[in-house]
Image (cartoon, coloured by chain):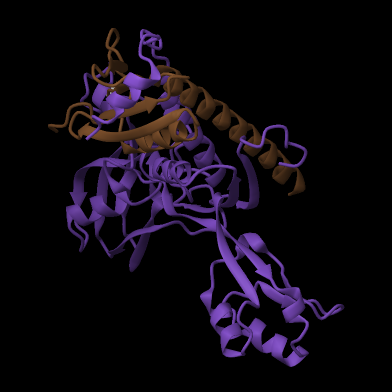
Amino acid sequence: MNAPDRYERFVLPEGTKKVSYEKDTRLSETGRFTLEKEDHTLGNVLRMQVHRDPNVLFAGYKVSHPLQNKVELRIQTTIQSSPVQAYNQAINDLDKELDHMKNAFEAEMARFTKDQ
Amino acid sequence: MEGDSSDPHMPRGRILKTRDRFMKFELQGTTINFAQALSRIMTAEVPTIAVDYVVIEENTSNFSDSFLAGRLRDIPLTSRRTTSLCYSSDCPNCNGKGHCPLCSVKLRLNVKCKGKSLHVTSKDLSSSDPAVVPFDFQDTASRGTEILKLRRGQEVDLTAIARKGLGKDDSKWVPTKVVTYFALAKVRINEEMMETLTLEQKKEWVDSCHSPEFEIDPCTQKVVLSHPEEYVDDEEVIRKAEAMGKPGLVELYRRNDTFVFTVKTKGSLKASDLVMKAMDILKQRLRLANPVEDNDTPDQSAGSASHTQDFDEVD
Ligand SMILES: [Zn+2]
């Protein structure tokens, strides 16, 4: 079988950076995040979450290299914020939302199991 | 969830129906992208265990070796213990060969037809791991999934090697039979106009709806939508109202923050486990993507004037 990294697509070998950030040299409050070993699924969710931030002027993503599974997320914010701030905020918010949803599901499952 | 209105931004989940391999639930306060991500992960990125390789010792049946292998690959195997099994490609024990107990489970099938004919089913497989068996193995009500039929004197002896994998690599690892989601439709009945209809007209209109969710309350004779979460957009009721000379009798619009999911699994995972696992996976991936060090302190020297100037350079 000639497909390297067939399964473990999201975890990187130790010492490799999962996310790197590059500030735009021409535009202020603009930068590009590169996520290694990621795909549309996360790119799309992240972009949407970043969009919810009122300080975000632009957020777009592309899968820069489908074979390497690299996602590029470009963010521009107002001067009240910064791309890094917006990015970290989006990740934290999504994380919280997921926790919330998981807890809600566990409680619902418990309710259903009791009923049956 | 009831009593959980502290933060309007927080998504809420509600299970509408759940059975072993089936679950219908509603997510509120989320986005279409999130719904998309969750459904994609459930289909393609939650690991399961499936037959990946078959070693055939003996096959005197009417079926080819590759047919048999295909049948075995399609039998869902209980996959609750995927966490304790390695992916064969990075098994530290057998260097990725995928034949050792750390990364594979062996299912032996050794059957011989001594009578006139014999139906060989998933229940004839014997697994090296009691936690990894055909999904209907312990179901006493089921006769098992048919694999093949043997005639007198025919024999099959094989070992199926099951491994952990992801649906995006091969359909045999896809845990789902169906995943659908739709944005919940909000329905507004124009009560005043509705009351101008006779009971016959109301009945006529209710009957035009393909799904039976509109009902006439026997006491009040009012038209009500009994299960909003069941309601699948049905333009027919609108056209019917127009045809009856009552445009605007009902309005339908989609809520873009509430989605109703229907999940049916093939049997390798319980529907509820699959949903929870999908959320865990999304969470893990978010955790991996976090955090970024802030080496980008907002540039104070960049005044609003130069900012606007810079902004013009976009494109
Ligand atoms: Zn191994």
Left or right, residue B64 beside residue B228: left
* Rendered location of residue B266, percent (x, y): 44, 52
Left or right, residue A55 beside residue B211: left
A47 versus A86 height, above or below: below
Residue that sits furthest to the left in the current view: A2
Q: Residue at left 40%, top 50%?
A: B124
The chain shown in purple is which? B
Q: Residue at left 43%, top 29%?
A: A56
Please state which of residues B277 and B287 is positioned toward the viewer in this rendering: B287
Image quadrant containing the N terminus of chain B: top right
Q: Residue at left 28%, top 16%?
A: A23
B245 versus A94 height, above or below: below
Please state which of residues B139 and B308 is positioned toward the viewer in this rendering: B308
B262 versus B195 height, above or below: above
The chain shown in brown is which? A
* Rendered location of residue A114, percent (x, y): 75, 43
Left or right, residue B185 beside residue B53: right
Please state which of residues A46 and A58 is positioned toward the viewer in this rendering: A58
Residue B116 sits in which quadrant?
A: bottom left
Please state which of residues B193 and B178 is positioned toward the viewer in this rendering: B193
Image quadrant containing the C terminus of chain B: top left
Please state the total of marks drawn on the protein image. 0
The reply to whether residue B30 is visible in this rendering is yes
* Rendered location of residue B128, percent (x, y): 39, 33
The reply to whether residue B87 is visible in this rendering is no
Residue B272 sits in which quadrant?
A: top right
